[in-house]
Amino acid sequence: MTYKGISMLNDRLPPKLVEPNGMIADPNCPPVQIPSLHPPKSGPRLPPWLAYDKQCLCFHAYFKETLQEVYHAPYQVRKVKIYFYLEDGTMQIIEPCVRNSGIPQGCLVHRQRIPKPPPCESEFLTLLDLNVDATVQIYDRVYHITNCDRFTRNFLNRAGISVPDPIDEPADPTAEYRKREGIKIVNPPAKKHPFTQFLLYDRQILKFHGYWDDRSEFGDVRRLELCYYLADDTIDIKEIYPRNSGREGPASFLRRTRLPRETYALPLPGQETPQTVLNVLGSGVRDVRYVIDPLNTGCKEVLYYSDRDLQIGAVINVFGRAVMLVDCDEFTRSYYRKKYGIEDFTPLPVPLREIEEVEEVVERILPPYNGWGTYEDSEGNCKSVEPKPPRIDFNKWYNYERYILRFGAKLLSTIPENCERSFVISYYLADDTIQIYEIAIRNSGFLGGEFLKRTRIELPGQKRFSVKRPLCYEASNFYIGATMNINDFIFTVVSADEFTLMYMEHNCSEFPNSDIKKIMEKVREAIRPNYKDFVGKCLPATAEGAKEMKFINYETVKRALSDSLGNGITNHEVITLCRYFGVEKEQILSCDREYVRSAAHLEIKRNLWNAIDELKEHLYHLNPGQKPFVSEMKIRSTLKGCRLPFGPELIDNILKVLSRNSCGDIEVCDFINFLDMGCGRVCDIPPMNIAFELCPKIPNLNKGRLINFACFLDELGLEKEVLEIEEEN
């Protein structure tokens, strides 16, 4: 509060209670009775441009303007708003615009410091001069303040200034006269600029489908597409050529132009002129005098088609050709529904051509597959004289290019050595191809490597040389526990990687074995009759152990579900169930605090960072109350704002070893001492890969091995049903 208008608020307090910064200092003195609803603000003093930045007081006022030319009203009341900006003590007066008032309104006084009226021209108006029910003179105009907004009232109350209640504004004699005399304010007609329609409806087109019935001796039904451009009311028509119609060339039926409703003969030269010329003197050569006809008597009015003339079932005269409209697109329907309230858009049938009436659609029967190449190549050679490569689904390839489902599999064989072999089956979602690799086992006699090249595999049990395209393995055929025949080798799927399981759980509509809702419904129906036996198989035999048991392992749940459902549940469904109710535990090696600090100091030395004072100042601004603990988010903001040369992995490791309180907030002093190189010496360490060597993480490869059995029972919801049945019995 450096300017005089705000600092004068402190002059009302006794001298003993006011410090140089404007705050109450002596607590032993009796309290001063300040007429305020709120206690005065206490805290460190800030400059007004910072403390009151973007804060403005708003007062509602009015002034009376004398009218000399109106006999029935000696004056008129003009309402204004007075804005007082706290940051620099400037003021601004704005008159809200009133429609059809006839007065130039808006900003009456620009933002500035306003001097007081004589004889105090050297002083400026301050906050103490503005209040409700107060009169202030500003540049030869007297304003009477009637009200203020809520922020202004609260601010003045906190400053110790009592704000009176709002007062009523006087009535405007001119407005009362208009009401008495019944004078209505008529809005002037809006001026329609010729460019307005283009700006409103540019690139908005009404599209209709129709036909022209030209079934004469050598004609047929011509399918047309009519486009009406709302920007300039023009129409163009294009013809749609059916396949094998024998027509070619440009499809333009009517170029873009305004279409007249009636068709006349071609006008003679000179008939189409913008103005009519009249001979007013005679037929002589010398006495002839021509003038322009202002009434345009010789001009004939031409009516053109507009949007209200186009609808389904309407017949359009296109220079003598009757075009029938039968359908429209969705934008056209919404346009007519919104503007004209039309709801019926039932398309009309289109008459068939003579060729279409006689022609019978014969399904093409391809010859059987002969075994050479792929089925797609052979099909392409039969459909076209010029062979073309088979087309791929580009959208599917683009969306699933990097998505690969990997499964672990075993080989089922009568040879014992083959049963010990392990395979990885990769399913590529981009093109539904399968690739199989064998994992090499030492001293097994098998080299390992690529077992099957990437290709599409047909489902077994189909005719090899048939007309229909054979069905191939899809992603839904793969799940843990599935048995499949691939090129006469029988594989059983025994495992899947984490990405595969997560993808199948997120797309459970394609993979029913990963749909937790269907699995829970199946389990609920199966164990409802023997609910207690199922719970007894999962929990320990002792009653005390059953009460304390909250988590059980995967093998126990699998054994209990297999006994209750038998073959009705697959291994993949059991794994999905255990993963859904699993207890996730991320195993992280403990980080050595001194080791992490040494790595942090090493990065500071390498990047020559020496801004510890700026770091402390930044923390002071983030924590003005000087709290001993701050949140982790503020510490991260400090590390990034001060541009410390730390990567994301090193920042995470530093935040893990810092001291925290019970709420998880980080101690400020410990954070500063941790980065201050002058506070304790650390041992030097060689450069390392911080992402992997500083605090390595062990991924949780056994997700779902520990199940929250209490949540599982709550999800089943059979406990209440069993208790109700026992009470009834």
Image (spheres, rainbow, N blue to C red):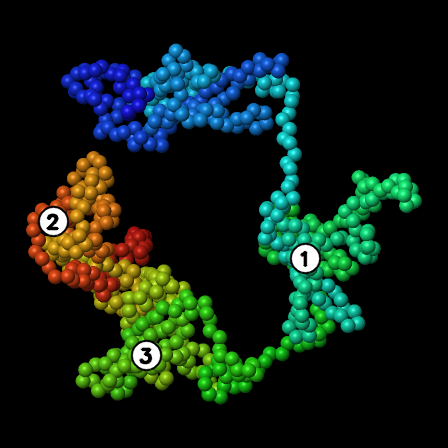
Q: Position of residue 188 (x, y in %)?
A: 64, 31
- 630 sits left or right of 426 in the view: left
Alpha carbon separation for disc pair 2 and 1 = 79 Å
- 247 sits left or right of 281 in the view: left
Tag shown at residue 256? 1
Q: Position of residue 582 (x, y in %)?
A: 25, 60
Please name the residue shown 63% across and 57% down the image: 207
Alpha carbon separation for disc pair 3 and 1 = 61 Å
Which element is circle 2 on? loop
Q: Give the quarter of the figure containing the N terminus.
A: top left
Alpha carbon separation for disc pair 2 and 3 = 56 Å
Q: Check disc 2 and give the amino acid type.
A: Met
Residue most extreme to the top: 119
For label 3, the crowd category at 10 Å Cα-Cα, with few meaning under 14, some 14 to 19 and many 20 or more, is: many
Residue 123 placement: quadrant: top left
Please name the residue shown 53% across and 16% down the image: 65
Please name the residue shown 23% across and 26% down the image: 42
Quickly name the residue at label 3: 436
Q: Position of residue 107 (x, y in %)?
A: 48, 27
Front residue (pair 344, 673)? 673
Q: Position of residue 43 (x, y in %)?
A: 22, 28
In the rendered image, the vertical position of residue 636 relative to residue 497, given as above or below: above
Quickly name the residue at label 2: 677
Between circles 2 and 3, the one closer to the viewer is 2
In the rendered image, the vertical position of residue 477 relative to residue 554, given as above or below: below
Residue 132 placement: quadrant: top left
Precedes in sequence: disc 3 or disc 1: 1
